[in-house]
Amino acid sequence: MQRSVSISGKSPSTLKNYSHHVAKMALHFGQVPTELDEDQINDYLHLMQQEHKTPSESYFKFTVYGLRYAFRISGLQEARVALPSIKREKKLPVVLSRQEVKRLMKAPTLLKHRVLIGLLYGCGLRCFEARNIKLSDLDFDRKMLHVRKGKGKKDRYVPLCDLLIKGIKAYIAAERPYEWLFNGKQPVEGRTGGAFDSRYSQKGVQWAVNKARKAAGIIKPMTVHTLRHTYATHLLEEGLDIMSIKDLLGHECIDTTLVYLHVAQNGRVKPFSPLERLYPTA
């Protein structure tokens, strides 16, 4: 499974989730899950529903996904088809108001965290995309950020506004980051002998955003990804058309964008960062 997941280009977290739930099932029966019959599999899935009712949706989902993947790489197509389908929840995303974004950006005491939140909102970045920004990805002359290997291994460019460029330059001058824009000191998983990943960790980004949320007095249940939803929604409200927003977000399919962007604007507007509209006199 590890080899197959690696070759397919799936993330390490996918391997971790799949293997964890398949291993739990193997320990339960004392047998490799691909050797179980349909009744045993259904009994186990029913047990999961009964024992994990509070977090059951994600636990049950990854058990099914892990089994489906294990069956596929083992050539057991019939067993894979027999597994239950997982319905996706159709929840609307949490979106911050413009005033809440202003409070959030003002809340951090560290310039590093203010710039981080500014990039997450001002460029609509996913958490791992912000962590993966290298100094060489910043094009201040063209006012563009090169987002490399986003979801689906796709590159894209997003605009940088003058306010954000000013903040990034001040941060670089003060902190002198090397290679990555946001440096950290996190041990590399699976390595020994003092090897380190010099990027800012995922937990570090989550902690910085959550701390700013509390300091800003925002009571909405927001995450790092909330800033990406807010970016897209604010662009739509400012008149940018849905196809341009799709491209800026790096979505493969327009349906993904339409989940939380319900109104397509007519005409095409030159892409811009919503930070420009937050501080029009900056």
Image (spheres, rainbow, N blue to C red):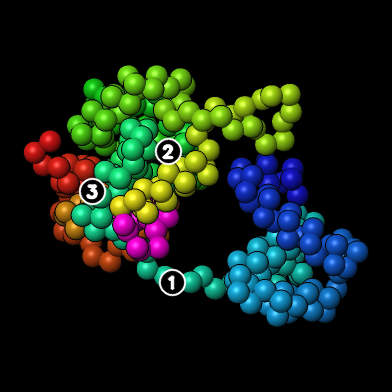
Mark 3 closeness class: few <14, some 14–19, many ≥20 residues within 10 Å: some
Work out how far the residue at label 3 is from the one at label 1, CA to CA, in angstroms.
29 Å
- In the image, residue 203 sits, relative to residue 175, either above or below, namely below
For the residue pair 14 and 52, the one nearer the viewer reads as 52
Instruction: Using residue 151 as the reference point, say whether residue 67 is left or right of it.
Output: right
Q: Nearer the viewer, mark 2 or mark 3?
A: 3
Residue 130: mark: 2
For the residue pair 280 and 138, the one nearer the viewer reads as 280
Q: Earlier in the sequence, mark 2 or mark 3?
A: 3
For the residue pair 84 and 130, the one nearer the viewer reads as 130
Work out how far the residue at label 1 is from the one at label 2, CA to CA, in angstroms.
26 Å
Residue 102: mark: 3
Residue 9: which quarter of the image? top right
- Asked whether residue 115 is in view, the answer is yes
Residues in magenta, as a range: 217-230
- Give the residue displayed 8% in from the left and 38% down from the top: 281
**Do the CB atoms of the residues marked 3 and 1 lie less than 8 Å apart?**
no
Give x and y (percent) for residue 268.
Answer: 17, 50
Instruction: Using residue 104 as the reference point, say whether residue 15 is left or right of it.
Output: right
Mark 2 closeness class: few <14, some 14–19, many ≥20 residues within 10 Å: many
Mark 1 closeness class: few <14, some 14–19, many ≥20 residues within 10 Å: few
Work out how far the residue at label 2 is from the one at label 3, CA to CA, in angstroms.
19 Å
Instruction: Using residue 269 as the reference point, say whether residue 139 is left or right of it.
Output: right
Query: Is residue 218 inside the magenta stretch?
Result: yes
Q: Amino acid at mark 1?
A: Lys
Q: Amino acid at mark 3?
A: Lys
Residue under pointer 1: 90
- In the image, residue 246 sits, relative to residue 160, either above or below, namely below
- Give the residue displayed 28% in from the left and 66% down from the top: 262
